[in-house]
Image: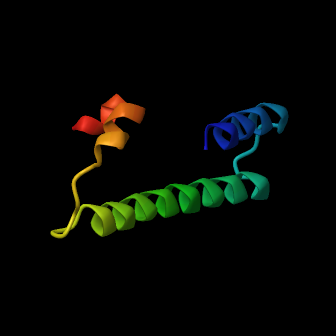
Amino acid sequence: MLALTVLQLLVAEIMPPSENIPLIEKYYIATMTMLTGSTALTIFIMNTHYCGPEAKPVPKLGHKVHPAVSG
């Protein structure tokens, strides 16, 4: 997503000034919107799936491998 934002800024600098939004910029905006939406939906689904009422505690091996998991 950061790469798409930087690319959009570079394209905006190269394009001549105009009152209309170029088609390539509309494409990048749509792509970033879909990417953001799909990432947010994936996070929500994974959180619902793994942290629902039947969520199991993290095993001890998980705590040893990655200490931040101990939350």
Q: Give 43 or 14, whichever is nearer the viewer.
A: 43
Q: Nearer the viewer, residue 13 or 71?
A: 71
Give the residue at x 57% y 57%: 35
Quadrant in which residue 66 is drawn: top left
**Residue 12 sits above or below residue 58 on the image:** above
14 relative position to 25: left or right: right
Instruction: Please name the residue shown 65% across and 58% down the image.
Output: 31
- Provide residue 7's location: percent of width, then percent of height: 74, 38
Depth check, front residue: 29 or 55: 55
Of all residues, the one furthest to the front in this rendering is: 61
Location of residue 15 with respect to 45 vertically, above or below? above
Q: Residue at x 78, y 54 (%)?
A: 24
Residues 66 and 10: in front is 66
Residue 43: quarter of image = bottom left
Give residue 4's position: percent from left, percent from top: 68, 43
Q: Where does residue 37 sit, x and y in percent of width and height?
A: 48, 61
Query: At 62% across and 61% down in the image, what residue appears?
Result: 30
State which quarter of the image contains the N terminus.
top right
